[in-house]
Image: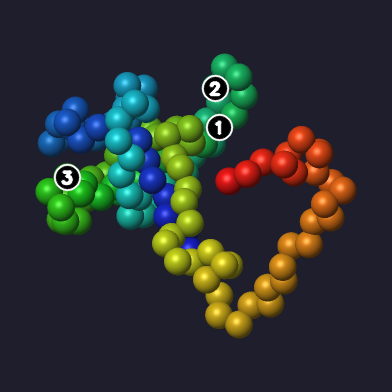
Amino acid sequence: ENIDAWCHFSFGSVRKDKHVWRERDMSANEHLVKRIIDRTLTQLPYGQSYIYTLELVDETDGDESGLYIVKNVPWKALSFYQKNYRSDMFIKGVFRHEMMIPDAMFPDAWKNIVL
């Protein structure tokens, strides 16, 4: 619930009848993954990896009206980001302590820098 998944995919290459991830989509923009529909373990030349079927949100019109099901998405096309204001540093009442770093840890050459 604190993590968003994003997928590289080019909606410009989408045909209405077929939404299949292609290697060239790796250089495309990332789009929000609304839902992971399926995950299949697949044998590849370098080992095993998961291939996903995803429901992606097309936000190119400024809203979330376009949902597309995209098949054959490899794990490398996915990125995971923490949602805004959901990291631990935003928890109220958390104990915080000043970081006390001894001056001896820094080289003398660094200590005479005037900002």
Residue 82 visible in the snapshot = yes
Badge 2: how crowded within 10 Å, few (<14), some, or many (20+)?
A: few
Identify the residue position indicated by label 1 in the image.
49
Q: Earlier in the sequence, mark 2 or mark 3?
A: 2
Q: Is residue 54 above or below residue 16?
A: below
Identify the residue position indicated by label 3 in the image.
60
Residue 17 at what x, y percent from top left? 15, 35
Confirm or deny contact between disc 3 and disc 1 (CB under 8 A).
Answer: no
Instruction: Residue type at mark 3: give it.
Output: Thr
| Mark closer to the observer (2, 3) | 3
Q: Which mark is residue 41?
A: none
Taking the spot 38% from the left edge, 46% from the top edge, the residue there is 6
Confirm or deny contact between disc 1 and disc 2 (CB under 8 A).
Answer: yes
Instruction: Residue type at mark 1: give it.
Output: Ser
| Mark closer to the observer (3, 1) | 3
Residue 33 at what x, y percent from top left? 35, 50
Q: Alpha carbon of mark 2 to alpha carbon of mark 3: how far?
A: 33 Å
Q: In the rendered view, does 102 fall on the left or right side of 86?
A: right
Taking the view exactly as shown, the residue that stands out farthest to the right is 104
Instruction: Residue type at mark 2: give it.
Output: Leu
Q: Alpha carbon of mark 1 to alpha carbon of mark 2: how far?
A: 7 Å
Taking the spot 35% from the left edge, 35% from the top edge, the residue there is 8
As helix, strand or loop, the secondary structure at mark 2 comes to strand
Q: Alpha carbon of mark 3 to alpha carbon of mark 1: how far?
A: 30 Å
Badge 1: how crowded within 10 Å, few (<14), some, or many (20+)?
A: some
Taking the view exactly as shown, the residue that stands out farthest to the bottom is 93
Residue 78 at what x, y percent from top left? 44, 40
Taking the spot 30% from the left edge, 35% from the top edge, the residue there is 29
